[in-house]
Image (cartoon, grey):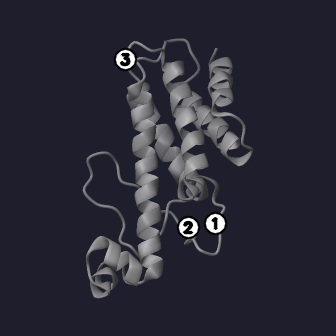
Amino acid sequence: MSEVAAAAGVSRQTLYNEFGSKEGLARALVRREADAYLCGVERALSGVSGAAAPGERLAAAAVWTVRSAAENPLVRAVLTGCWNERLPTSVRAAPLRSPGSSGSPGPSGPLPAPGELLGEARDRAVRLLEGDWPSGAVELPLACEAVARLALSYVVAPAPAADVARMVRTVLA
């Protein structure tokens, strides 16, 4: 806590007042990374050319998921539920911040479980794609859930991120 306080330019007491303990600080960090992951999913869905087909946008979100988990052990842990002794564990459901909300659970509150994070990613994808989803195609929530779970399989059993994009395109074709 001393090193974190020094790096942040605050006193140790300020950290303890804000987070309560090392565990509270760790939970806040994991929660922040989960929120950042979800913002990244939204950027991936929106960042592809606006004229891009919804399937291409879902492929971009799947690639983001795989790359984000490969580069960030906290994101990987919260997506898979595979925690080590140095990371706080998720014990019960925790609401995630939606875009524009001002707060998240307190530092001692629960962390999102993998299914909850996946569900939030799915819901955000549905919200961003619903106006562009072709009629007659598979139901949008089902497609978003399938793509999220497919991406998660690439997190658990790694392969090149480009493979997940190809797989998403094939499945949605």
Q: Which numbered mark, 2 or 3, is in the foreground of this view?
A: 3
Q: Which numbered mark, 1 or 2, is in the foreground of this view?
A: 1
From this viewpoint, which residue is outermost toward the bottom?
Answer: 13
Local crowd size for mark 2, using a 10 Å CA cut-off: few (<14), some (14–19), many (≥20): some
**Residue beneath the point at 33% across and 78% down:** 5
Q: Circle 3 sits in a helix, a strand or a loop, which is it?
A: loop
Amino acid type, callout 1: Trp
- Residue 83: give its label: 1
Sequence-earlier tag: 2 or 3: 3
Q: Decide: is 151 above or below 48.
A: below
Residue at numbered disc 3: 50
Q: Is residue 95 visible in this depiction of the protein?
A: no
**Residue beneath the point at 60% across and 59% down:** 77
Circles 1 and 3: CB atoms closer than 8 Å:
no
Amino acid type, callout 3: Gly
Q: CA distance from mark 2 to mark 3?
A: 36 Å
In which quadrant of the rendered image does the N terminus lie?
A: bottom left
- x then y, percent, for residue 78: 56, 57
Location of residue 22 by image quarter:
bottom left
Local crowd size for mark 1, using a 10 Å CA cut-off: few (<14), some (14–19), many (≥20): some
Q: Is residue 104 visible in this depiction of the protein?
A: yes
Residue 114 as seen in the image, left or right of residue 43:
right
Looking at this view, is 102 or 83 the one in front? 83
Looking at this view, is 142 or 124 the one in front? 124
Q: Decide: is 21 above or below 79.
A: below
Circles 2 and 3: CB atoms closer than 8 Å:
no
Looking at this view, is 115 or 3 the one in front? 3
Circles 1 and 2: CB atoms closer than 8 Å:
yes
**Residue beneath the point at 45% across and 38% down:** 41
Residue at numbered disc 2: 90
Amino acid type, callout 2: Ser
